[in-house]
Amino acid sequence: MEGLGRLFNVIPIAADTVAVYLGECATISFVCSGSDTYTVSIATAFTGTYRAGAYAGFSPAWTPIDHYYKSTAADGSAAWTRVTLGADAATFTSTGLMTVFAVHTAGIRRLVDSTGTDSGAYTYIKCVSTGGGLVRAVTHDLAVQRGPANLKILSA
Amino acid sequence: MSMEGLGRVFNTVPIANGKYISMKECAAITFVCTGADTFTITEALTSGGGSAQGISTLITHFYQSTSTAGTAVWTKQTQSGADAVVQGAADITAIEVHAAWLDDTFDYVCCTNGGAGGLVWALTHDLEVQRKPENLAVLVA
């Protein structure tokens, strides 16, 4: 069986406006290239309102990232270095030419919007790069392993 | 979860066109390519491409999608065995190569576009040893 669908699913062009469905994976890793600021936001529906970490309805604030990995080369010729954020956040700036960070769905699904505006489960995520850094998405720890042709469309 | 996907499930090279990637610590690699282009797989003895050669007629199928942004399904495509995939239309082409296919002592594999600007992103998976990311061997070295 393929790695695609057994271990992961992917979106190669996943920056900014691209929403990724999290309902069938435990974790998403964003593989980014370019020194840039990366920010994640989430929504209860594909076309819903994407809430940032500091959205007032999240109490406490949604701050899913406490570290990331960077490399000084995007072509695989350098090692990974762990960078720990000073404070948990939904946004960070990486100086690496390659950056990988993960968001675990377990920390999202329990979120409840205290304003009552969005009462459903948050199952969609976007990653915005401020300066045009490229973003690739890898969903992994899949709930169900399927042949690639049977995978749910990730951005729908 | 105590351990990253990076280093547990996969390692990655985002800008991988023409790069010889080590398969010493993985059983398979998936090249996620974008663009209409010809993607050719070669193997080599070194990360510098020493003694590079085609992988013969081992690619008999691949997966493609009409959207690079994840808005379309994957479809399986079959072909007569080859060491390349000619992609004329679809936006994503996913080609999996197994370490077991490589000739003895050929530990590096490369996906190269045919000059039309197709992008290549590499994911090594089925890792022999799961390590935290900073302990992973450099893939192109």
Image (tube, coloured by chain):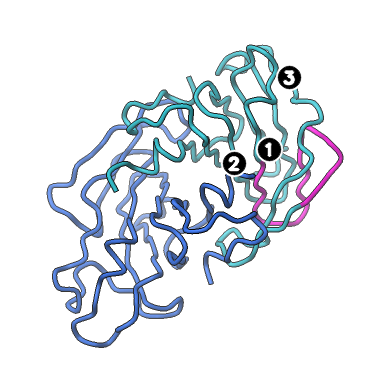
In the image, is residue B86 part of the stretch drawn in magenta? Answer: yes
Residue at 14%, 69% in the rendered image: A60
Disc 2 marks a residue whose amino acid type is: Val
Mark 2 and mark 1, same subunit? yes
Residue B136 at what x, y percent from top left?
A: 38, 27
Q: The chain shown in cyan is which? A: B
* Disc 2/disc 1 C-alpha distance (Å): 8 Å
Disc on the earlier residue, 1 or 3: 3
Q: The chain shown in blue is which? A: A
Q: Is residue B21 above or below residue A54?
A: above
The residue nearer to you, when weighing A72 against B13, is B13
> On the picture, is B114 further left or further right than A33?
right
* Subunit that carries the residue with mark 1: B
Residue at 19%, 42% in the rendered image: A84
Q: Residue furthest front?
A: A144
- Which range is magenta? B77-95
Q: Is residue B41 above or below residue A143?
A: above
Q: Tag on residue B53?
A: 3
Secondary structure, mark 1, is: strand
Disc 1 marks a residue whose amino acid type is: Asn
Mark 2 and mark 3, same subunit? yes
The residue nearer to you, when weighing B126 against A126, is B126
In the picture of the structure, the residue carrying the numbered disc 1 is B113
Are the residues at dot 2 and dot 3 in contact (C-beta closer than 8 Å)?
no
Disc 3 marks a residue whose amino acid type is: Gln
In the image, is residue A118 part of the stretch drawn in magenta? Answer: no
Quarter of the view holding residue B57:
top right
Residue A57 at what x, y percent from top left?
A: 19, 79
* Disc 2/disc 3 C-alpha distance (Å): 19 Å
* Subunit that carries the residue with mark 2: B
Are the residues at dot 2 and dot 1 in contact (C-beta closer than 8 Å)?
yes
In the picture of the structure, the residue carrying the numbered disc 2 is B120
